[in-house]
Amino acid sequence: MRTESAPKKLISPADGILILGLVFVCFLFFVFRALNQPDELRVVVEKHGEIVYEQKLSGDTDPFEYTVEDTAVVISVHGCTVSVISSDCPDQICVLTGTLQKAGDTAVCLPNQVVVRVLGSHPATVDGITG
Amino acid sequence: MKQSIVPPISSKTLKILAAVLFCLVFALAAILFSSWVQGPKGKQTTLSTYSMGSLVQQTVYGNQAEAAASAASFAVTSLENQISWRVENSDIQKLNAASGKQNVPLRDTTAKLLVQMLDVCEQSGGAFDITIAPLSLLWNFDEAPSLPNADDIGYFKQFVGYENVFYDAAHQQVRLDLENCAIDLGAVGKGAACDAAAAVYREHNVKAAVIAVGGSIGLYGTKPDNSDWNIEIRDPNKNGALGVLHLAGGFISTSGSYEKFFEENGVLYHHLLDPSTGYPADSGLVSVTVVTDSGALSDALSTACFVLGYEESLPLLQHYAADAVFVTVNNEVYVTSGLADRFDITAEGYTIQ
Amino acid sequence: MKSNYRNITPQAAKKVAFCGLLAALAIVLSVFENMLPEIPLLPPGCRLGLSNIVTMFTASAVGLPSAVFVAVLKGGFAFLTRGITAGMMSLFGGVCSTLVMWLCLRSKHFAMLGVGICGALTHNMAQLTVACLITSPAVIGYAPALILFAIPAGAVTGTVLRFALPALERIAHQ
């Protein structure tokens, strides 16, 4: 047991090191978090609500086309942009949506229940779109 | 008490204890750190389903997120089966079939919705009218829109009128007093679906959730980072956003002439009909977005406000303590006071009033 | 008749009574700090840790087993009044921080501020671990904030005790 005759001081060098160390650890946390945000775009295709296709988008890849399985919906991936180029739906809204390039851009084909989205690593800034 | 029976601990034991503790703390830190790297977003689930002819998208935050999202999706489909005139044996289909004849009993949800909608019909002076079905079927915007001839419009217009709906509150029954009168809740179904989802979220003690049924949006709770919900309003004239609403909560609906329209002989005909004329409303607006505390109400009000135009909508919105963003044909944007510092316009070419 | 019970010394009885008192004090402090409004930016349920003052005192003036006992009682009270989650958090936080504080008190290197900070830090980290296991790994996002907060909170408890300790010990040993 600690003897009563030598009461503890209020602060000591070790305390100082402890505080500095903790602050430094926190600093590392924040630095790590800030650095760990690569700005990568990817295209995600959902059918009936489930993801059936996912692909990173980068400027280097050659343009290619992908047909959503069991449907006649064809998307074209060109660099960092995606567009629906053909579909068998009557209204062709998905095709008319045009080019998807920013995170959050979406094309929907209701009759085929297909959704094509462009997503980024950053969390979406918009929670919903009305209109 | 200071005369402890326990012998003093030797410094060697102390060092060992310290080393063990250090290792424990280090292990703890390692576990915490590795879990932390996964990201501080909190338990979150997204679910996309299809109902009411639209994409239903949910993002739910909370421990029971997945269960709540599935339950909400089910609730939306159940609601559709109850209120859609297209669905066999739905309350509304039975009601329309019995027009001019007898009372039809309604289930609780349908009855509540009907009463709420009849109130909007009355407060809007008929600008919003749930009995507009005969005219909407004539114009047929959902499948093959075409310009009906004036005689047909005149003929079917006589069956439109919410005053023909007789509601017996005591027995929860409704009667359409005029034969061929019909109710179409399609204009408010999406908002009502958002209300149904909110009820499910409440039951599941969800922390926060956002549901979008087509363009009708329902917000529930507070996001994990305590920030406002950001809701983008589509630009009525071009691709992209008009601006962003920063809301603490509420239900949002938009009615826009650009959503469904066709052109004939150089004239644009859109799907938001004025019940008093039988023709698309000509109120000087291209879109109106309403924010209020009920989904069905926001749907109804957005339709009513579009028909009424900016000036005449203001008393209606005030009555329901709702707010709105209006876009006119002259690219002017009006924002009611409740949303004044909550709407950021981002598109070019518009003047805020 | 020979008694089958060991005689309970007045000292032992005093000790038990004193520990009960300390436990009650720890509980009162934790109830009080729970009534204070929540601190923004920190996870809900994060408190000042005033009860650390009591466990720190018990660890230094009475002994480690008694201090752990007080921490366990505090956790038990939290369990009875606020439910199993709060109980687990309080128990683990309290016991771990008591152990660490006792070690720090014995160490030559750490003074009262260091003891308080180590106690607050351990309390927070232990609670975070429990929260992580009970809910989801995502709560780890709070770690930097909790670490930073432990510094002033621990400094406060350390300072309070540094100045109160001599007086309290005099009272305790009368």
Image (cartoon, coloured by chain):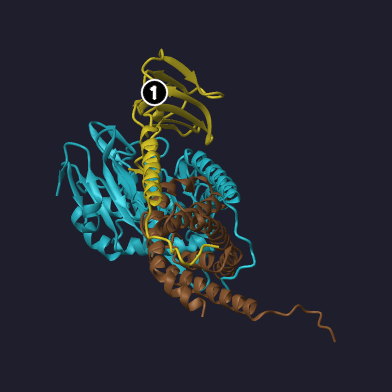
Residue in the image at 44% along x and 23% along y: A56
Which residue lies most toward the front here? A5
Residue B298, how many percent across, how many down? 35, 55
B289 or B315, nearer to the observer = B289
x and y percentages locating residue B282 in the rendered image: 22, 46
Measured as percent of width and height from the top left, residue A124 is found at 38, 39
Q: Colour of chain B?
A: cyan
Q: Which chain is brown?
A: C
| Residue B40 versus residue C75 in the image, above or below | above
**Which one is nearer the viewer's eye here, A95 or C86?**
C86
Image check: B262 left or right of B106?
left
Q: Which residue is tagged 1?
A: A82
**From this viewpoint, is residue A4 visible?**
yes
Is B307 placed left or right of A34 in the picture?
left
Q: Secondary structure at mark 1?
A: strand
Q: Is residue B13 above or below residue A36?
A: below
Residue B223: % across, % down:
40, 51
To which quarter of the image does residue C49 belong? Answer: bottom left
Q: Nearer the viewer, residue B327 or A18?
A: A18
Chain at numbered mark 1: A
Kind of residue sitting beneath label 1? Val
Q: Which chain is yellow?
A: A
Residue at 22% from the left image edge and 53% from the top image edge = B341
Taking the view exactly as shown, the residue that stands out farthest to the right is C1
